[in-house]
């Protein structure tokens, strides 16, 4: 998980929270929080998540792909949350 950029981690969280979203759905959801995201930034980062096994990619139809978090992606998010918690929970 440490090899991912912050944007890639954010995409992973968004995908985890949606049911097989299209790239456009991911784009619309993340833009609510961070502002405009260009296609040239979004899709290469989604491809990186797929290539690293954190996300799977399938087809809704001939024109629309969907993205789904993989078991490795879920584990990575859980490990990241555990790592972050050690700092937030420290007194």
Image (cartoon, rainbow, N blue to C red):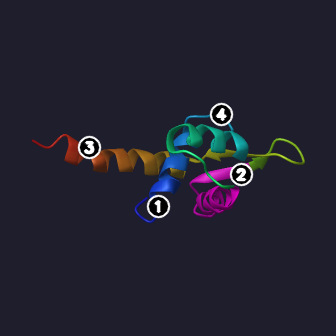
Point out which mark residue 57 bears. 2
Q: Earlier in the sequence, mark 1 or mark 2?
A: 1
Tag 4 near tag 2, CB within 8 Å:
no
Within the magenta stretch, is there residue 45? Answer: yes
Q: Which residue is mark 4?
A: 19
Query: Neighbour class for label 4 at 10 Å: few (<14), some, many (≥20)?
Result: few
Mark 3 or 1: the one toward you: 1
Q: What's the CA distance linking mark 4 and mark 3?
A: 27 Å
Point out which mark residue 85 bears. 3
Locate the C terminus by quadrant: top left
Q: Earlier in the sequence, mark 1 or mark 4?
A: 1
Q: What's the CA distance linking mark 4 and mark 2?
A: 12 Å
Q: In the image, what residue occupies the spot 55% across and 48% down? A: 11
Q: Is residue 22 visible?
A: no
* Towards the viewer: 64 or 28: 28
Magenta extent = 39-57
Q: Earlier in the sequence, mark 4 or mark 2?
A: 4
Q: What's the CA distance linking mark 2 and mark 3?
A: 30 Å
């Amino acid at each position: 998980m440490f090899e991912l950029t912050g944007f890639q981690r954010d995409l992973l969280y968004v995908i985890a929270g949606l049911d097989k979203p299209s790239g456009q759905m991911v784009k619309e959801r993340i833009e609510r929080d961070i502002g405009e995201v260009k296609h040239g930034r979004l899709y290469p980062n989604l491809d990186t998540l797929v290539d690293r096994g954190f996300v799977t990619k399938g087809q809704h139809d001939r024109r629309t792909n969907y993205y789904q978090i993989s078991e490795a992606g879920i584990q990575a998010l859980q490990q990241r949350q555990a790592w972050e918690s050690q700092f937030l929970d420290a007194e």
